[in-house]
Image (tube, grey):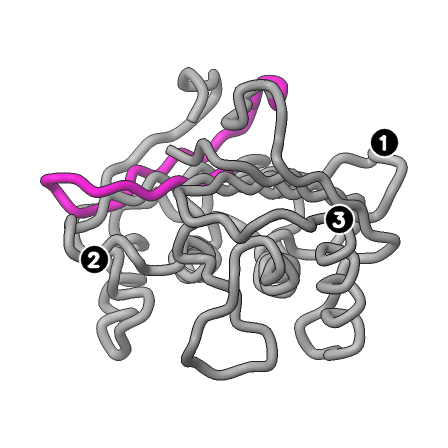
Amino acid sequence: MSAPPRGATFAWVEGSPQAAENPPHDTEWCAAIAMRVVRGLQGIVEVGLDFELEPARTLIDLDNMVRLAIDALRDTETVARGLVGIETIVATKRAGRTPGLGLSLVRTPGPLVDDPFGGEADLVVMGTSVPREEFAAEKDEWRNAVAAAWRDTLVRQPVAIDIAVTKETSLAAMLKPVIAGLEPYLGRAPRGRGRLRPLDEQVTWLRISRQRDLGVALRVRAGVGGR
């Protein structure tokens, strides 16, 4: 992530983030996050989530860990239902010696200057709308747009994904259907549920932000370089 922003509250949550895909331990992980957060913080516009994972357990999907952490923040009333007011979520994952979550809750963020692509993304694709999880046709349309924009070989390295939207609904709710449509870029998992099964375990840097002057409903940039 970028240099620490002004007007931010920081916390370290010790424990294994892999609980996000390991019920019923996910409930315990949510409780651990909630215990480290000052209940009812006001004016949060950006959430930063840095997950440190056991070296043997790094294949957990970053968006799953993000959504569970956001659920915990909502339970503490740190963020509102629907993530009203949250304009940016930034998340990373990496192997480390001390499993846990570095959490930052930002009230006065700086500009979006962190560029994990070294100045040029491998994939840039636009959408006229943001696909919704409950509508298969919308997800298929988005997947087809990605397939048309990416004709190269599938990536097999750590990847960064930068999602920009204009839509005023929950940023966390948009993550899964948008990332699902990146299957032509990330590859398809051989097993699992769902019609779209991207190998998104490769994603190690993820940002979704609301940019009202974007000019399109959805823009995704992706490339090797996730940290």
Q: Quadrant of the N terminus?
A: top left
Q: Which mark is residue 87?
A: none
Question: According to the image, label 1 marks what residue?
Answer: 213
Asked whether, in this view, residue 134 is left or right of residue 225, the answer is right
**Vertical position of residue 94 compared to residue 147: above or below:** above
At x 28% / y 41%, what residue is drawn? 94
Tell which residue pokes out farthest to the left in this image: 97
**Vertical position of residue 80 compared to residue 27: above or below:** above
Compute the Cα span from label 1 to label 3. 23 Å
Residue 14 can be seen, yes or no: yes
| Residue depth check, mark 1 versus mark 2: number of the one nearer the observer | 2
Q: Position of residue 212 (x, y in %)?
A: 82, 36
| Residue depth check, mark 1 versus mark 3: number of the one nearer the observer | 3
Residue situated in front as seen by the camera: 52 or 224: 224
- Which mark sits nearer the N-terminus, 1 or 3? 3
Q: Which residues are magenta?
A: 89-112
- Which mark sits nearer the N-terminus, 3 or 2? 2
Asked whether, in this view, residue 130 is left or right of residue 28, the answer is right
Residue situated in front as seen by the camera: 204 or 12: 204
Question: According to the image, label 2 marks what residue?
Answer: 57
Q: Position of residue 211 (x, y in %)?
A: 76, 35
Q: Tell me if residue 39 is in the magenta stretch.
A: no
Question: According to the image, label 3 marks what residue?
Answer: 149
Compute the Cα span from label 1 to label 2. 39 Å
Amino acid at dot 3? Ala
Q: Tell me if residue 93 is in the magenta stretch.
A: yes
- Which mark sits nearer the N-terminus, 1 or 2? 2
At x 68% / y 43%, what residue is drawn? 220
At x 85% / y 31%, what residue is drawn? 213
Q: Secondary structure at mark 2?
A: helix
